[in-house]
Amino acid sequence: MLSEKMKKALNEQVTAEFYSAWYYLSMAVWAAKENFDGTYNFMAKQAKEEEEHAMKFIKYILDSGGEVELGEVNKPPKDFSSLKDVFAKALAHEKYVTNLIKKLVELAYEEKDYTTLGFLQWFLEEQVEEESTMSSIHAKLEMVGESRNGLFMIDSHLGQR
Ligand code: FEO
C-alpha cells in the first residue's frame, strides 16, 4: 500500500521517464538530420528504454493498488550544436535523473516503505550504467574533437547498439 506522498512522487517519475524518452527522441531526430545515422539508432533505442522505465513505474503503482495519473510531458529542446553537445546534455540529464531516483529513495526511507525501497534498487543500478555509458561516449567525443574521421567512427560504433 503506497502512501499518498509516495504515490504522487512515483507518478511524477512516470512523467519524468516519458520526458527522458521524448528528450532522447529529439536528440535522435537531430542526429538523423545531421546524417549521424548511428547516433539516431542509439538515441531511438535509448528513448525506447526510457519508455520501459516509465512502464515499470506504472506497473509498480498499479500492482501496489495505487492509481496512475499521467502528467503533462514538456516539449524537449530540438537544437544541438554538435554531437558532443548531444552527449554532454545526455550525461547531464542522466545525472539529473539519478538525483530524482535518490529523492524517491529518501522519501521511501522517510515513509518506511521498504517494498518501494526494494523496487527502486534496480533503478539506482540502472542509473550507474546509464551515466557511465553517456560519460564514456562524451569522453570519446572530447578525444576526437573536430576530426571528421573520428566523428564518423564514433557514430558508426553507436549504430551497433
Ligand atoms: Fe530512465 Fe535514463 O533513466
Image (cartoon, rainbow, N blue to C red):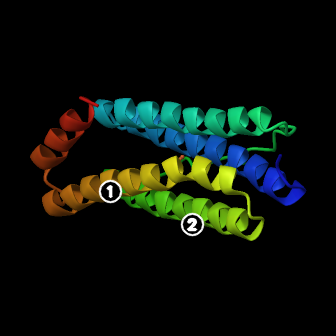
In the displayed structure, does residue 30 sit left or right of residue 144?
A: right
Q: Quadrant of the C terminus?
A: top left
In front of the other: 128 or 34: 128
Give the structural element (helix, strand or loop) at label 1: helix
The residue where tag 1 is placed is 132
* Residue 7 rendering spot, x and y as whole percentages: 82, 50
In the image, is the residue at mark 2 within 8 Å of ligand 1 by its beta carbon?
no
Task: Tell me if mark 1 has few (under 14), some (14-19) or many (20+) residues whose alpha carbon lies within 10 angstroms of its own.
Answer: some
Image vertical order of residue 151 relative to residue 143, above or below = above
* Residue 38 rendering spot, x and y as whole percentages: 29, 32
Is residue 86 something one can see in this rendering? no
Q: Residue at x 58, y 46 (%)?
A: 20
In the displayed structure, does residue 146 sit left or right of residue 70?
A: left
Give the structural element (helix, strand or loop) at label 2: helix
In the displayed structure, does residue 38 sit left or right of residue 32?
A: left
Q: Quadrant of residue 111?
A: bottom right
Q: Residue furthest left?
A: 149
The residue where tag 2 is placed is 99
